[in-house]
Image (tube, rainbow, N blue to C red):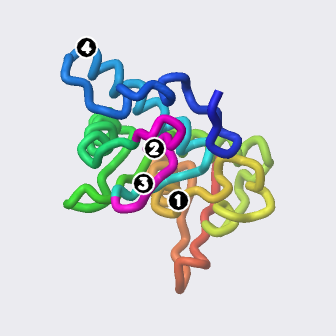
């Protein structure tokens, strides 16, 4: 089985037709689903939040079979994730895509679980501590995209589970949890 770093690629990655958009509807649907799953799994494994269509990604090419996805195919697969609510285009030209390998609600639930499991209820953390602090090392929160984190925290705030404190800069924004 082929790997990208520590990530094991699925068997279809070595099958050249899957690098070309398939014309038959049933085959295309299966192809799209396989690529959606691969993009989400790879992004989660590598902690990738943004995929740029203007940059080469090892995810979209297989040198051993001399195949790469076309720009059109990348747009089709990422657009399918957008339709599923698992990604969002970050610009009108569809050049950058935010990958939501966990939906915002799932991130909010994960944060709340993390807070409870680590006894951080009624505690205050900075947003940067959540993204890169000692407590979050080795968790899904380590390195989380700031925009995704803020959206999850705002969702918790709307539910009365957190209060976001604005600082004088983005580095000193804080959150008090009331899990």
Q: Report the Cα–Cα distance between label 4 and label 2.
A: 23 Å
Chain-order first, disc 2 or disc 1: 2
Say if residue 140 shows up in the picture. yes
What secondary structure is marked by label 1? loop
Closest to the camera, between mark 2 and mark 1, is: 2
Q: Earlier in the sequence, mark 1 or mark 4?
A: 4
Q: Quadrant of the C terminus?
A: top right
Q: Indicate the position of residue 105 as horizontal and vertical percent values.
A: 47, 40
Which numbered circle lies on residue 61? 2
The residues colored magenta run 54-67
Instruction: From the image, tell me which residue sits under label 4.
Output: 26
Vertical placement of residue 20 versus 49, above or below:
above
Residue at image mark 1: 145
Query: Which of the two marks, 4 or 2, is nearer to us in this view?
Result: 2
Q: Upstream in the sequence, badge 1 or badge 3? A: 3
Q: Mark 4 vs mark 2: which is more N-terminal?
A: 4
Q: Is residue 101 above or below residue 141?
A: above
Task: Give the percent coordinates (x, y) of residue 88.
Answer: 33, 49
């Amino acid at each position: 089985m082929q790997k990208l770093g520590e990530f094991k690629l699925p068997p279809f990655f070595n099958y050249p037709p899957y690098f070309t958009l398939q014309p038959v509807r049933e085959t295309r649907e299966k192809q799209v689903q396989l690529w959606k799953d691969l993009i989400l799994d790879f992004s989660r494994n590598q902690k990738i939040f943004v995929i740029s269509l203007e940059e080469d990604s090892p995810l979209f090419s297989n040198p051993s079979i001399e195949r790469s996805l076309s720009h059109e195919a990348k747009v089709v697969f990422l657009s399918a994730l957008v339709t599923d609510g698992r990604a969002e285009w970050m610009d009108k030209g569809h050049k950058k895509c935010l990958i939501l390998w966990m939906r915002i609600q799932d991130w909010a639930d994960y944060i709340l679980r993390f807070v409870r499991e680590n006894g951080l209820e009624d505690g205050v953390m900075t947003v940067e501590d959540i993204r890169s602090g000692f407590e979050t090392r080795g968790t899904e929160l380590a390195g989380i995209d700031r925009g995704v984190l803020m959206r999850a925290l705002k969702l918790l705030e709307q539910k009365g589970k957190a209060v976001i404190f604005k600082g004088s800069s983005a580095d000193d924004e804080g959150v008090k949890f009331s899990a």
